[in-house]
Image (cartoon, rainbow, N blue to C red):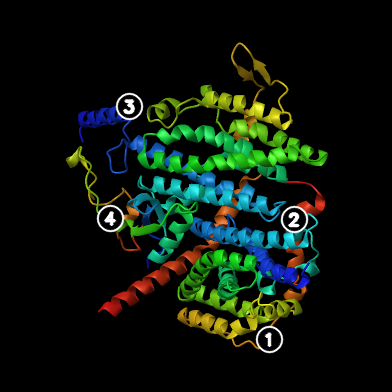
Amino acid sequence: MNKDLYKYILGLADNCLILGQRLGELCGHGPSLETDIACTNLSLDLLGQVRSYYQYAAKLKGNDVTEDDIAFLRIEREYLNVLLVEQQNTDFAYVMSRQFLFDTYHLLLLNELQKSHDVTLAAIAKKSIKEVSYHYRFSSDWIKRLGDGTSESHQKMQNAIDALWTYTDELFHQTEADKMMVKQGIGVDVTKLKETFYNKVSDILLEATLVVPESKYFQKGGKHGVHTEHFGFILSDLQYMQRTYPKMQW
Amino acid sequence: MKKNWPLWEIFVRSKNGLEHRHFGSLHAADAEMALENARDVYTRRNEGVSIWVVESKHITASNPENNGELFEPAQDKVYRHPTFYDLPDDIKHM
Amino acid sequence: MSEEKLKNLEEQFEARIARDEKIEPKDWMPEKYRKTHIRQISQHAHSEVVGMLPEGNWITRAPSLRRKVALLAKIQDEAGHGLYLYSACETLGISRNELYDQLHSGKAKYSSIFNYPTISWADIGAIGWLVDGAAIINQVPLCNTSFGPYARAMVRVCKEESFHQRQGYEIMLKLCQGTQEQKDMAQDALNRWWWPSLMMFGPTDAESTHTAQSMKWKLKRKTNDELRQQFIDQTVPQAEILGITVPDSDLKWNEERGHYDFGKIDWDEFWQVVKGHGPCNKERMTARVSAWEEGEWVRDAAMAYAEKQKTKKINKAV
């Protein structure tokens, strides 16, 4: 099995899994029924993508490994998601900021991934990009609404963007496996997306009358399996059933 | 400033060749949100190729045939909806 | 309006319904019809929305990806149902804000089944199987109810509801075909959800106040007891297929009646829960009230933004 390809797929999928999981926590608690439905939609789309990725990874692993084995039975160090998606649902401004920052990146990523030499990944990207285009439109609209809404929402949005900014740089890091995949024409060179990302994000923030943070210090580690304190608790929920009742069918 | 999200009527064309049909209503702050919400609520199972949203207050309705003179005074409103009437925000008990 | 004219209108109104004509929002209607429908439709809507909470508890802990997405989709459907029903209700001249006020203040009720806790994964199966099963029995007749918007909303709801029940039953089936621990989990869930599900059909016919009027307006086709019996008759064989036992020692097929005889329902428990003293009443209300209150700044911001955009457009055009 191509170990680098396997790791690469996990990197792509784990972001969607953890973000989908965070969005799932919101169900029934959103500011309106309409936004509840919208956020659940985001979660469903992301988890659908996760399943495509993990099913592919499972096939590569062979030995009757399933999508669920990959989703639920790794230890913390084996999850390769970025730190951004682990951040909590502190308030709706945080939820939308996290979403917007990820969606901007995700859309750029998928746009390139469509050209992957790996037929399966290209196909997943082609299908996902339709969903993610909508996610981006949705989250960027909310950045504008909240940034340029009331003074209270403006402040909350600024706080959220300031707090999450430190997690943006990691999106453009590459692990050794990533670099291998880029060499083989399978993976996307995310370092090339960085400038466009920050330009796009700045444009929206400015339109939303928000200040673009000038932070110089960025957090990292997720892509190498070194996560934040939140991650253990996420796994407690996620893995509870599979760990408590091992090897059963649901 | 009005604080309540206005009501919008949603029309969906399920398939090319069919007309738009009235599917129901929802609340949204603006047309963009109304479209997004309508997509999420009414086309979850791939039920639509086109969505129209119209603020309910912009719809003019005819009177049903019977009992013309016994009708609700605001004859052009779609519903009996009380918040269709633009009153100043600081009116109490209304 | 003279009393005679009013009586005339009422007679014409009832005749229309008897002819199976639909009543639409702008049609003349007796005030009682309007109020009754507001009460029933809003309670139905509130139930969908509050119902998202006991199931929402298990989204992050669903035991497989397939179950996780199915559960998310189901709950999303319920939010959508709430929306269709609030829409239908609003056509009768009441605002969404007022409806939420009624719910949050405790003035309006919602189905008491949602005041029970979901303490195991099997509960999610039991809810789909039993609670949605009971809901379907109540809802299918409503597709023909006299008030147009309610009938149309119910058609949409019923179309989506059958997936919910099947999903729940499949969860139970998988558990019952699994390990002893899983079978025990399923049996335990049935033990806790059976009687509350029977209570979903409301008090006995002898204790029911609104029945005659509701029948005339096609809000009800059968009585509470008739529907409850229908539910029991159809569900007991389903439990037998699963291989788990309904927690009623008096449950017995009665050949003469052609129905199952069943034991006494604890009506004290029913009224206790309805009056606000069930296991989760406070939590459910707190969750809904918090979501609404904590979301106020978001809704205000959206309106403020919309107003600003409108002003910008006007200034541009000028």
Query: Which numbered tag is attached to residue A66?
Result: 2
Left or right position of B73 against A101: left
Front position among marks 2 and 3:
2
Pinpoint the chain carrying mark 3.
C
Q: Position of residue A97 (x, y in %)?
A: 57, 73
Residue at position x 66%, y 30% in the image = C238
Residue at position x 53%, y 35% in the image = C136
Considering depth in this image, is A238 or B71 the residue closer to the camera?
A238
Alpha carbon distance from label 1 to label 3:
73 Å
- For label 4, the SS is loop
Q: Residues within 10 Å of mark 3 (few under 14, many from 20)?
A: some
Work out whether mark 2 precedes mark 1 in sequence or the reverse, and give the earlier one: 2
- For label 3, the SS is helix
Alpha carbon distance from label 4 to label 3:
31 Å
- Specify whether disc 4 shares its chain with disc 3: no
Alpha carbon distance from label 2 to label 3:
58 Å
Mark count:
4
Q: Are marks 1 and 3 in contact (CB under 8 Å)?
A: no
Instruction: Say which residue label 3 marks.
Output: C18
- For label 1, the SS is loop
- Specify whether disc 4 shares its chain with disc 1: no
- Specify whether disc 2 shares its chain with disc 1: yes
Instruction: Say which residue label 1 marks.
Output: A217
Query: Which numbered tag is attached to residue B59?
Result: 4
